[in-house]
Amino acid sequence: MAERVRLSLPSGQRTSHRLAWGDLQLGSAGNLGSLEWSVVVLDELTIDLEVSVQLSGQAAAGGAGGAAGGEGGADAPGLVLLQEVARGRTFRGTFDPTEDPRLGGGDGGSAENDGVAGSRVEAVIFDFNNAFSWWTDKEVELVCLRVRPGGPPASMVPPLRLLQPLAALPRSICSARGAFECGVAPGLATLPPRGAWEASLSDREEVLRFASSLDEWLAAAEARRPAEGSAAAVAGGALLQEVLERVVALRGLCKEASAKVAEVPARTVVGQNGSNLLPLTAELLAAQDDRTSGAVIDCLSGDPIFDDLARRELSDIVARDTEDGEKLAEGVAQAVEKGVLPADLVPPIYEQIDVMGKTADQVAEEIIAALPKQGGCVLILVGLSGTGKGTTVEKMKQKLPNAATWSNGNCFRALTLLAATYCAQQSKGFDAACLTPENLAAWADMLEFVSFDGIFDIRIRGLGLDVRVSEVANTLLKEPRVSKNIPAVAKETQGEVVKFAGEAVRKMGEAGTVVLLEGREQTLNFIPSPYRFCLTMSDTTVIGARRAAQRIAAAAAPRAAAGEDAAAAVRAALAEVAGSGR
């Protein structure tokens, strides 16, 4: 049984999804056997994800509850950590309580313990965190494949008998004596359903498959020819002889065609969106990358339901980008009014890169070719959501050994820590009224970006504090007085953080690092750099198709992993996603 959930994560916020392990009305008979999950962040963005198991009260009191360790929410009693906090665009995982030694399963548990393990689990908790991003909301697709335990169903009704293939249908043929005799149609070598393989084969392979199948069919039919001298052969006469001669000639053509086509070099399969495609398989769906999106788009090309979903997704992307741009523009205007950012900035020029028909690897190589061959620099990458900024940055990080990305999250956390410390020294709780231009300017001066033994870090020095961000990232900067007040501080400090980031990335670039920044023009225009690129799409409808394909692939991956044909899984996922109305 598959379950798909779509979650919205506002900037700077976090949310959790609780997946109940069983049906309370069925008792232990309603427990799951195992679980597979897949998480995809749309628009090629990233989030933090932690996955844990909530145990029942009785189990939590025992040894299993004591196994809960690690960081984050899994520190609570009765929780067992399945996946530590990790940042990424896609996540996959499995959980089987009968195989987890912390729950009495696995090699160390007996068969009796294995049966108890499933009953200890109450729910699986997915903790989604967007606290590090203060300008971008995120959309997340969670797909869970719930697998019941093996054996007879819980009601103890024996399973149905397996279906067996039926015998071939009889055919009636007229004998020379006028009586009807029953024969069996020859075993035809038929092609698989079109669509399951058509998009992943070259023209050459399709012709070869057809010629081979036709030749096998003709061979089977020829083998059933009436015996020479038989009454049927005599009755057929010259007409039968002509049919047999044409069968022989046609089989010769099939063999000749196969030989000639086999000599033609194979070509790369090109999809409707202009990109090279790989065969649509369960492995490709599990990859959840730009290749996956291209294959899904081509598989569903011309489908009116998919086209309508793509149009809706494009409309949502444009509306969200417009809203985010307006929010950022307000923050920039506020920073200019305070004198934090210059009012006379001349909008910089961006080199336009049309990503239509290109893979993320090709786009990354095109940008890298324009960067300095040696040393560091600051790269600015902008573009409409869905054009592949996040994927391109990840590809560049893989190709450039000295590349690093920059995140403003720790800057916002450091300023929030100073604001909370200031309020505490005033003998009161956090109050947004303290966020005056004078205080913000003073606190921004307490942040330094310096190199310690060749490693850059943010130093917080002021209000009695003298710490490095790397030292307190999991302690002071994650205290409730910081976490819950970051949105209020981030709203007032966009200018201060952009100014700090510009100076920080300049130092990193001069030290030999290729610093990668991707985001919105409204703020990145204030980061000095001659290396600016804007990803565009000459056919903007493909942007909506990409996002629709991401959602469909996320829903189809568990189906394909469970053995369903990949193309069939994609079409089933299309119906599910399109029917959700989101």
Image (cartoon, helix red, strand yellow):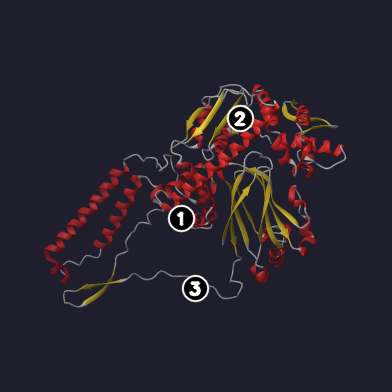
In the rendered image, which residue does mark 3 sit on? 161
Q: Is residue 34 above or below residue 308?
A: below
Identify the residue at the far front of this view: 337
Residues tagged 2 and 3 counted as in contact (Cβ below 8 A): no
Residues tagged 3 and 1 counted as in contact (Cβ below 8 A): no
Quarter holding the N terminus is: bottom right
**What is the C-alpha distance between the residues marked 2 and 3?**
64 Å
Mark 1 residue type: Arg
In the rendered image, which residue does mark 1 sit on? 571
Q: Quadrant of residue 55?
A: bottom right
> Can you see residue 106?
no
Mark 2 residue type: Leu
| Residue under the point 34% across and 69% down | 168
In this orientation, which residue lies closer to the viewer: 459 or 232?
A: 459
Percent position of residue 372, x then y = 56, 22
Mark 1 or mark 2, which is nearer to you?
A: 2
Going from N to C along the chain, the mark reached first, 2 or 3, is: 3
Q: Is residue 239 left or right of residue 17?
A: left
Say what secondary structure mark 2 lies in: helix
In the rendered image, which residue does mark 2 sit on? 524
In this orientation, which residue lies closer to the viewer: 490 or 280?
A: 490
Mark 3 or mark 1, which is nearer to you?
A: 1
**What is the C-alpha distance between the residues marked 3 and 1?**
29 Å
Going from N to C along the chain, the mark reached first, 3 or 1, is: 3
Percent position of residue 551, x then y = 53, 50
Mark 3 residue type: Arg
Percent position of residue 31, x then y = 65, 66
Say what secondary structure mark 1 lies in: helix
| Residue under the point 54% across and 73% down | 159
